[in-house]
Image (cartoon, helix red, strand yellow):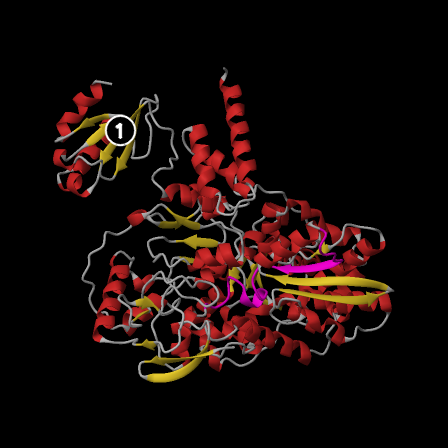
Amino acid sequence: MNLLNVTIDGIKIQVPEGTTVLDAARLANVDIPTLCYLKDVNEIGACRMCLVDVGAKALQTACVYPCSEGLNVVTNSPKIRDIRKATLELILSNHDRRCLTCIRNQNCELQALADKLNVREISYDGVPKGLPLDNISKSIVRDNNKCILCRRCIAACNKIQTVGAINVMERGYETIVSTADHRSIADVNCVNCGQCINVCPVGALYEKDNTQVVWDAIKDPDKYVIIQTAPSVRAGIGEEFGYPIGTPVTGKMVGAIKKLGFDKVFDTDTAADLTIMEEGTEFINRLNNNGKLPLITSCSPGWIKFCEHEFPDFIDNLSSCKSPQQMFGALIKSYYAEKNNIDPSKIFVVSVMPCTAKKFESDRDEMEKDVDISITSRELARMIREAGIDFRSVEDAQFDNPLGEATGAGVIFGATGGVMEAALRTVYYILEGKRINELDVKPIRGTQGIKEATIKITGIDVNVCAVSGLGNARKVLNMIKSGEKNYHFIEIMACPGGCVNGGGQPIVPAKIRNRIDVRAERAKALYSEDMRATYRNSDENEFVQKFYKEYAEKPGSHKAHELLHTHYVKRDRYIATK
Amino acid sequence: MCQNCNLDEKEKKLQEVLNKHKDTKGALIPVLHEAQEIYGYLPLSVQEIVANALGLPLSEVYGVVTFYTQFSLYPKGQYKIQVCLGTACYVKGSSSILDELKKQLGIEVGQCTKDGKFSLDACRCVGACGLAPVMMINEDVYGTLVASDVANILKKY
């Protein structure tokens, strides 16, 4: 590769051809302010904060300007500072500046930039937008009064996820990020994945906050409140309390939750183990009885809604298994209630998920209120702070029994490839009578969007694929349609990298996202827990074994189907209410 | 011809347009132009057909339709009123003419009266700055307007 000699603020460096001025400056340890820029997601030079002098007539945007041989760049001068400041003041002029009560207070890239550029006064009095709040969706709230039109959400929705629920509408002063026909996000093809929230630099997009509902349930003496936490929550929530990305904080998280006043603190991972028993059995049945293949996993509600809107032909390929969140609720309100003599109508199940789509899922008609309310990792962190708990000094605690003992297979559910690996561990064991060689499933680990492996089971070459990110899901499904690919079993997770990077996880500002692969770091936390687990196969979960023995007979039984399986609906491609 | 046959005819024509452009990249704008010629405007239902055929999100199509002033979400009236909001007309108070028209007709910019008689649009510079503020009704030009002129002008149609 050709190396170019460039000078950034007097610092001489060599950079490969194709490097932007922004990346070159980072190599030279020169910090150029950015706002709309998000590596690999949004690189469009829209906000003009990264203007630099490259010796051309006009200042250029560093995030998209390519280096050339001998380029001399000045990133900071009185003129550049003045222009940047004026631009930022204009952006702030009609931004709803009620920062104190904003969901992103102290975690806002706009706020941080205003401070960094030393903006203390806003010279322009913009007309407030006065736009209505879109809070009809069960998952996502949109506040266009906060929006700065950076278009990161549009890139996430269109480029990464290929959902295309939102785009830029109208022009000039009326320019707005909105949906077709300016409908509520609840009434279009939005899949609730929340990737738009994770990339929003300000408080224009956030999850529907359910924390008060949870507080009210805890306070209610008539309610038996049970909380479950999904695997990815423990891999992310530490970030909310200052831990480095990828620090597993299971013990502290459980300890903190116990202080909030729940009656029981359980682990969703046990339900994940149960999912594997049901889904694995479903796969074996389809494989042996010429059933519909490929079987596609159904744990990710964002993926499910995407399939219902965009690929209704594949609905029969979806596993009929409820997701672990829902299986957990169903289990609690039947078997657990019966065994512990609790009136199921008094049980209130709260789930903590790395996910915004789980809110929509728990509210689906097909789910019969297995889970009463779902909150995100961020909401749990807020509750912990609100309760005055010093997370870092909380003593490690363990999940309550009996639904606290999950296997390593249940833990890795949070990373792309994890559900597939967990399923293969058990399916292989059931069919072959021995454990799978871990090296055989290695190809489906890692953060790549599409991963494949072929595993010989009972003489059959079983082709499996693990997909994350809906854009990748679209690619794979189209390849299956055209006959280019042929799989037996596919895992699809809506969010790139899987649940660890879900729309409900702690927000990582662009500054860090541009440097670190958050998905890989958080996934490491899960795989390390898997390595430490006493049992690493779902079929070894003692609670799950007992559940079948005492209650549901065997995986795939009539009773199991009644309780743990569901169905899906075909939806219009573009409009939700039709 | 009955209303429904007419509709079918239009959809058939649209289908021909879509077949012609289906595999061309960047065909959205030409397709929308031709669709608007067929229907006179671009209601959401037509945008949906276009989006589906071209494999685009409806939001993208809607974004393009609302960006370009030559595309309209509403049918145009028998008499198309255009009020100039170019610099000269704007300075001379054309927004008050526009406001008066909205009041008299009971519609917003871009819309059409229920009886289909008038539609109202804002435009940029019609090249008659000396007569500012200016509005046009189909081919008729009205200049040096004040808001109180509006009612009488509308009566002529």
Q: Position of residue A500 (x, y in %)?
A: 56, 68
Q: Nearer the viewer, residue A11 or A234?
A: A11
Question: What amino acid is labelled 1 in the image?
Answer: Ile
Indicate the quadrant where residue A96 lies: bottom left
Residue at the spot x=71%, y=68% of the render? A421
**Mark 1 belongs to which subunit?**
B
Name the magenta segment's main secondary structure. Answer: loop
Q: Is residue A493 magenta?
A: yes
Q: Nearer the viewer, residue A205 or B65?
A: B65
Bounds of the magenta segment? A483-507
Q: Nearer the viewer, residue A62 or A427?
A: A62
In the image, residue A33 above or below residue B75 = below
Q: Position of residue B30 (x, y in %)?
A: 45, 39
Q: Position of residue A527 (x, y in %)?
A: 64, 76
Packing grade of label 1 (10 A; few <14, some 14-19, many >=20) is many
Q: Is residue A541 magenta?
A: no
The residue labelled by disc 1 is B81
Tag 1's secondary structure?
strand
How many callouts does the rendering have? 1
Q: Is residue A407 visible?
A: no
